[in-house]
Image (tube, rainbow, N blue to C red):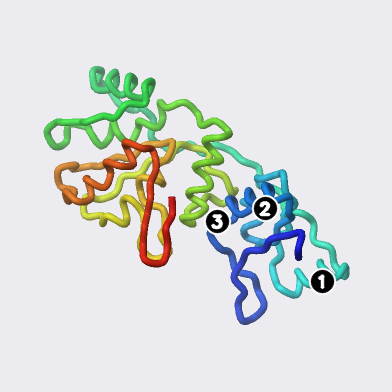
Amino acid sequence: MSNAIAIGELSLDGRINPVSGALPSALKAAELGKDMFCPAPCGAEAAWIDATKVIAAPTLMGLIHHMTGQTTLAPATPRSSHIAPTGRDMSDVKGQERAKRALEIAAAGRHHVLMVGTPGSGKSMLAARLPSILPPMTAQEALETSMIHSLAGTLGADGLQHTRPFRDPHHTASMAAIVGGGRGAKPGEISLAHNGVLFLDEFPEFPRNVLETLRQPLETGQVVVARANAHIQ
């Protein structure tokens, strides 16, 4: 085991249950030049880091048989990836030419947008379709976004985030939900929206302390969560 790292949660019947963070764990294993053992459901996710060999075992006994040479487990392979349509496209919007032009400029320059208008004028509809006019994610952006969603346990079945995320938390969301933290210091909505869109509908309804916590991430580009038992950046 000195040349490998292992992640997983062992159940009482010997099965190895999936855990969050398989993708960043595989990246760390590659940096250390080690192989990786992980639960079978995490294999397709971890295998996207092709610089390390990933062995995905369904049970502890299966892993023991592999290590003793009784039954060899084949290295995990990433699932074939495809970009699924989101069903929200800017071409669906009829009219609203000035608003669409403003969003095109914002998308091209990666600017923030403040949308003001009467209820029912189409603000939420337009915002939800903003990701459809953003450029496709680069390989580096997809890897960055996928690692964040892996830590949060929200990564797709094929193990890689292919589309730009769109996050629209409710205005009653807590500070920990927006910025991150809580039990285990999980990523918040601002991190989950990395390389995508964070839409704060009914912006004035958000608590002031929640909006103030967004200042540092917007200025520095980093989120620092400090708790009594964890400090994560």
Rendered location of residue 200, percent (x, y):
25, 42
Query: Furthest-right residue in view?
Result: 69
- Secondary element under disc 1, as helix, strand or loop, is helix
Q: Is residue 220 left or right of residue 139?
A: left
Task: Looking at the image, tell me whether mark 1 or mark 3 is earlier in sequence order.
Answer: 3
Would you identify the image quadrant in which residue 181 lies?
bottom left
| Helix, strand or loop under label 3 | loop
Q: Residues within 10 Å of mark 1 (few under 14, many from 20)?
A: some
Which residue is drawn at the image coordinates 38% and 38% (left, top)?
Answer: 221
| Marks 2 and 3 close (CB-CB < 8 Å) | no
Q: Tell me which amino acid carries mark 1.
A: His
Mark 2 element type: helix
Q: Mark 2 or mark 3: which comes first in sequence? A: 3
Residue drawn at the location 34% of the way across and 41% of the way down:
217
- Residue that carries the numbered disc 1 in the rendered image: 65
Please say if 51 is above or below 60: above
- Give me the C-alpha separation between circle 1 and circle 3: 25 Å
Q: Which residue is mark 3?
A: 21
- Upstream in sequence: badge 1 or badge 2: 2
Marks 1,2: beta carbons within 8 A: no
What residue would you read off at disc 2? 29
Q: Nearer the viewer, mark 1 or mark 2?
A: 2
Q: How far apart are labels 2 and 3 at the CA level?
A: 12 Å
Q: CA distance from mark 1 to mark 2?
A: 22 Å
Choose mark 1 or mark 3, whichever is in front: 3
